[in-house]
């Protein structure tokens, strides 16, 4: 079930829980400044690298099943206040649907913030999955955005 971003009461609740004043403001100012200075496309590799570094700092325990992996990821996201992930595995890869992403407070900046956070998550998911024994040829890319707080990623071989 997707987060209803049109529900202002629900959005205010999530923003209050996930975007503490001061730290979140500093983070969004930094991301906005970087995107303004170098451009959105040019900032993506750096943001992905930050996600990889975050994964290295907060590694997951080795998981035997997709369910264990999903639970381990959700435990980290609960600690971060970053929502939840639901993983679906198939023969050609995995789909990771991340819901309740932290949302930028200003509606005008929500898409840019979502794009930046998605780049971070691509790096984070990619590093976590590689550390679980994933093949270096596999990548994580945003596959579909249902809303600025509900995004699906695909883990697959781009060849």
Image (cartoon, rainbow, N blue to C red):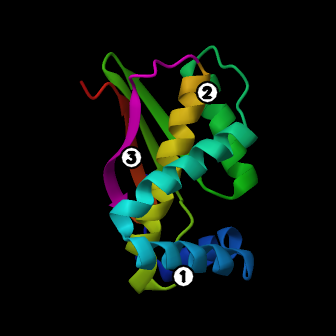
Look at mark 2 in the image and give the residue it sits on: 69
Mark 2 residue crowding within 10 angstroms, few (<14) / some (14–19) / many (20+)? some
Viewer-side residue, 57 vs 96: 57
**Compared with residue 60, is residue 107 higher up or lower down, i.e. above or below?**
below
> What whole-number distance in Å separates the C-alpha atoms at marks 2 and 3?
17 Å
Location of residue 109 in the rendering, given as x and y in whole percent from the top left corner: 43, 80
What is the quadrant of residue 60 in the picture? top right
Q: How crowded is mark 1: few (under 14 residues within 10 Å), some or many (20 or more)?
A: some
Give the residue pinned by disc 3: 152
Relative to residue 151, is residue 56 drawn left or right?
right
Q: Is residue 144 magenta?
A: yes
Task: Give the residue at x 43% y 62%.
Answer: 43
On the question of residue 132 being in view, the answer is: yes
Q: Do the residues labelled 1 and 3 touch (CB within 8 Å)?
A: no
Q: Position of residue 22 (x, y in %)?
A: 74, 82
**Distance Cα–Cα, label 2 vs label 1:** 31 Å
- Foreground residue among 102 and 67: 102
Q: Examine the rendered structure and indicate whether residue 41 appears above or below residue 86.
A: below
Identify the magenta region: 133-146
State the CA–CA distance, disc 1 to disc 3.
22 Å
In the visual, does 26 lie left or right of 47? right
Q: Is mark 2 on a helix, strand or loop?
A: helix
Q: Determine which residue is flagged by label 1.
A: 105
Q: Earlier in the sequence, mark 2 or mark 1?
A: 2
Is 145 colored magenta in this rendering?
yes
Note whether residue 84 is visible: no
Q: Do the residues labelled 2 and 3 touch (CB within 8 Å)?
A: no
């Amino acid at each position: 079930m997707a987060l209803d971003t049109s529900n202002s009461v629900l959005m205010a609740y999530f923003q209050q829980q996930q975007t503490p004043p001061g730290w979140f403001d500093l983070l969004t100012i930094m991301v906005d400044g970087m995107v303004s200075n170098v451009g959105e496309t040019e900032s993506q590799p750096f943001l992905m690298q930050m996600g990889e570094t975050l994964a290295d700092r907060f590694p997951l325990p080795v998981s035997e099943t997709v369910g264990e992996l999903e639970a381990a990821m959700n435990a980290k996201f609960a600690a971060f206040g970053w929502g939840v992930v639901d993983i679906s595995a198939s023969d050609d890869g995995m789909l990771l649907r991340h819901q309740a992403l932290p949302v930028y407070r200003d509606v005008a900046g929500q898409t840019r913030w979502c794009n930046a956070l998605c780049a971070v998550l691509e790096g984070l998911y990619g590093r976590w999955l590689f550390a679980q024994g994933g093949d270096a040829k596999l990548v994580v890319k945003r596959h579909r955005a249902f809303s600025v707080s509900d995004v699906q990623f695909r883990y697959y071989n781009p060849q």
